[in-house]
């Protein structure tokens, strides 16, 4: 280990590492990722799931590869359509013959109250996002041409939603990246109060992010996974957040060591020796936790796991290899105007964190009770959480497809825009349709296309798409048609996909969360060689997760007006909060272990808090701000993940790590490290008399 550190910090190594990094970066950027990362999120269900089987069987029917756009006409004053408006709509269908799949579009259907009319335009599936958007723009333009005054038209249906979701992610990565860079840059300037020091970690982590996106895309492709824009967006946020955290820890330790070593390379060697294991342990915890997502049933979860795990590995390598090389190219003047001078005394024992640690040590039981009470109080908000968002509730801003679907839901049965699809053996199709009609919540069931072997039946639901009522109807519909002897009936469609996705997400959550907890515990066990400390640290992190979830739900209900949390939000938030939240405990407790061997548990924790308090607080605030950046995107799922992780990281940084963990350590004393014994057999307090005097009079 010592030889490796000496090699990394050698005089020539800095230039070699930076040159090699530049060459590798140039090669990878020139080759590119092979994927734009601008595609919208897919369904991601396994082929064996019922709705996926229906989709596969539909490809065997004459209308295979078809989708549809629904044009929703209504009066802008919400009154009945006028005679002129009705005549226009009735004559509108031929306008779309050229874009339809077979050159024909059925005539308009009018609602019973005469306020709304819809035209369903059959379309061929278009995989290319840009061409799909161009076709949608052409349809919108044709639909609105020469419309009578007061008549409005909106593009909805499967094609409308696909186009609007793609539009959400059009340029999303650039917007997210630009905002992230600005936030990180500003916070680094505030942290270092230097006109140029902040540029070094920002450039290094920025390069790491660029490479991580390319490498992650290629690694995912090796196992047959394609990354969409939501995954690559979270990847960038994670690389910037975790990478900057590691950079802050290393630079802080390097700055401390410059006080004790005249040669900056010796200082960097010592800094890497002290901070390196903590970075590797914390990064390894995140990577292993992310890799548990490979056990998931949903492709989206597996994609996020492999992409983000790859990104964190890249961030760690850049923090431990490229960043030290970059820092060593400059002298102590890099820290100007607060230059660490060789031989100067550390200000740790005069700082606020030393005073806070000493204050907590005097009444640890009271502090622990108050801290845990705060977490418990915030956790009460989780009792009323509603999980699941309908199709029209996915966006913070309301796109045209959602507005159109809401109009359809008010005027027609709620599922008119996205009927359930039943595939059955052709000789039993009529029997299946009759059974489907009798299911409570099904408005109609119509026999459709057939290839002689299987037949498609379209079932319109009364409930709005993807609502709890619609999903319950799908469950009842499946039970009913499965009982038709000899039909081999299967139910698919949008609502069925939503139900299957929810079921898969619940399964993934139940499987993966215990794995994450086990991994975090084992990492802490190996790192600290203790049983008590890992248990307490894990409990505090889980407590902060539930507290952040409860606090976020109150915020969603009272301020942001979100009707519920999306199905994947809890799993992803738990993963990021537990894996990243334990980082700060690792940074603190590994330093406390190091100090406790020399000074005893009480003094060791105080000294560790004094040494790491500033940098961990800065890192936590920065990470919270970076995840909050996900809110720039109009998709509610990403906003919710960003808010929950932001609140959780702040709780971890400002409450759990600052007072609760030190208080629990003081309460346990040397037992905190059990069964490991400190190198010093007797609890000692080597805090300087001068420092004790300052604290006593503070």
Image (spheres, grey):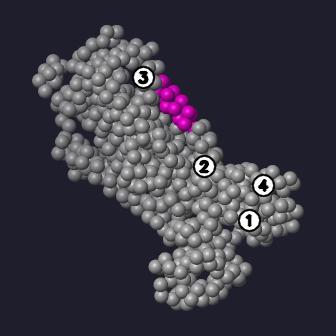
**The magenta stretch spans which residues?**
512-528
Rendered location of residue 590, percent (x, y): 38, 27
Cα distance in 3D space between marks 3 and 4:
55 Å
Mark identifier at residue 481: 4
Question: At 63% from the left edge and 62% from the top edge, which residue is drawn?
Answer: 462
Mark identifier at residue 533: 3
Question: At 77% from the left edge and 65% from the top edge, which residue is drawn?
Answer: 456
Provide the secondary structure element on which disc 2 rests: helix
Residue, far front: 113
- For the residue carrying disc 3, how many other residues have a C-alpha within 10 Å: few (<14), some (14-19), or many (20+)? many
Q: Quadrant of the C terminus?
A: top left
Q: Closer to the observer: label 3 or label 1?
A: 1
- For the residue carrying disc 2, how many other residues have a C-alpha within 10 Å: few (<14), some (14-19), or many (20+)? some
Q: Quadrant of residue 128?
A: bottom right
User: Left or right of 670: which side holds 35?
Assistant: right
Which residue occupies the foreground of this view, 38 or 504? Answer: 504
Residue, far top: 681
Q: Which residue is mark 1?
A: 445
Q: Which residue is mark 2?
A: 502
């Amino acid at each position: 280990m010592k030889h490796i550190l000496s090699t990394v910090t050698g005089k020539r190594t800095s230039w070699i590492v930076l040159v090699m990094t530049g060459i590798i970066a140039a090669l990878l950027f020139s080759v590119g990722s092979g994927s734009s990362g601008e595609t919208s999120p897919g369904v991601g269900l396994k082929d064996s799931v019922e709705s996926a089987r229906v989709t596969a069987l539909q490809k065997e029917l004459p209308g295979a590869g078809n989708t549809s756009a629904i044009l929703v006409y209504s009066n802008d004053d919400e009154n009945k359509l006028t005679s002129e408006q009705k005549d226009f709509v009735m004559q509108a269908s031929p306008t779309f013959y050229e874009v339809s799949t077979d050159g024909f579009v059925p005539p308009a259907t009018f609602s019973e109250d005469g306020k709304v009319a819809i035209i369903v335009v059959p379309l061929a599936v278009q995989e290319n996002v840009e061409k799909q958007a161009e076709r949608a723009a052409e349809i919108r333009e044709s639909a609105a041409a020469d419309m009578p005054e007061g008549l409005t038209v909106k593009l909805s249906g499967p094609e409308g939603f696909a186009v609007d979701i793609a539009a959400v992610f059009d340029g999303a990565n650039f917007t997210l990246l630009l905002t992230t860079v600005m936030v990180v840059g500003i916070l680094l300037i505030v942290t270092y109060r230097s006109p140029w020091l902040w540029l070094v970690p920002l450039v290094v982590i920025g390069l790491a992010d660029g490479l991580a996106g390319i490498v992650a895309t290629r690694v995912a492709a090796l196992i047959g996974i394609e990354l969409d824009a939501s995954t690559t967006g979270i990847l960038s946020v994670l690389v910037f957040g975790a990478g900057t955290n590691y950079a802050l820890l290393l630079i802080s330790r390097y700055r401390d060591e410059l006080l004790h070593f005249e040669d900056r390379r010796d200082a960097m060697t010592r800094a890497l020796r002290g901070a390196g294991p903590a970075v590797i342990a914390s990064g390894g915890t995140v990577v292993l936790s992310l890799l548990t997502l490979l056990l998931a049933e949903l492709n989206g979860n597996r994609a996020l796991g492999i992409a983000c795990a790859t990104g964190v590995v890249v961030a760690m390598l850049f923090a431990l290899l490229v960043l030290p090389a970059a820092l060593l190219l400059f002298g102590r003047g890099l820290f100007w105007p607060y230059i660490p001078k060789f031989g100067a005394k550390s200000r740790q024992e005069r700082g606020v964190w030393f005073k806070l640690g000493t204050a907590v040590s005097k009444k640890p039981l009271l502090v622990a009770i108050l801290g845990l009470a705060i977490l418990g109080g915030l956790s009460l908000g989780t009792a009323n959480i509603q999980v699941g968002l309908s199709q029209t509730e996915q966006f913070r801003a309301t796109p045209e497809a959602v507005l159109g679907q809401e109009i359809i839901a008010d005027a027609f049965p709620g599922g008119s825009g996205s009927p359930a699809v039943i595939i059955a053996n052709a000789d039993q199709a009529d029997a299946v349709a009759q059974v489907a009609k009798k299911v409570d919540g099904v408005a109609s069931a119509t026999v459709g296309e057939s290839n002689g072997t299987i037949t498609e039946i379209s079932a319109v639901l009364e409930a709005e798409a993807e609502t709890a009522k619609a999903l319950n109807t799908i469950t009842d519909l499946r039970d009913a048609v499965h009982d038709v002897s000899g039909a081999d009936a299967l139910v698919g469609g949008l609502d069925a996909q939503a139900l299957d996705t929810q079921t898969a997400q619940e399964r993934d959550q139940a499987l993966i969360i215990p794995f994450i907890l086990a991994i975090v515990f084992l990492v802490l066990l190996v790192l600290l060689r203790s049983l008590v400390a890992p248990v307490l640290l894990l409990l505090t992190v889980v407590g902060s997760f539930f507290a952040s979830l409860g606090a976020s739900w109150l915020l969603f209900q009272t301020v942001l007006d979100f009707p519920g949390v999306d199905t994947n939000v809890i799993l992803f938030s738990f993963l990021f909060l537990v894996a990243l939240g334990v980082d700060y405990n690792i940074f603190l407790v590994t330093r406390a272990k190091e100090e406790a061997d020399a000074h005893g548990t009480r003094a060791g924790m105080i000294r560790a808090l004094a040494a790491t308090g500033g940098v961990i607080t800065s890192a936590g605030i920065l990470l919270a701000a970076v995840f909050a950046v996900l809110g720039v995107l109009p998709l509610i799922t990403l906003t919710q993940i960003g808010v929950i992780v932001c609140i959780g990281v702040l709780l971890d940084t400002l409450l759990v790590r600052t007072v609760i963990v030190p208080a629990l350590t003081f309460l346990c004393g040397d037992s905190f490290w059990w069964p490991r014994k400190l190198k010093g057999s007797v609890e000692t307090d080597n805090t300087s008399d001068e420092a004790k005097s300052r604290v006593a009079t503070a």
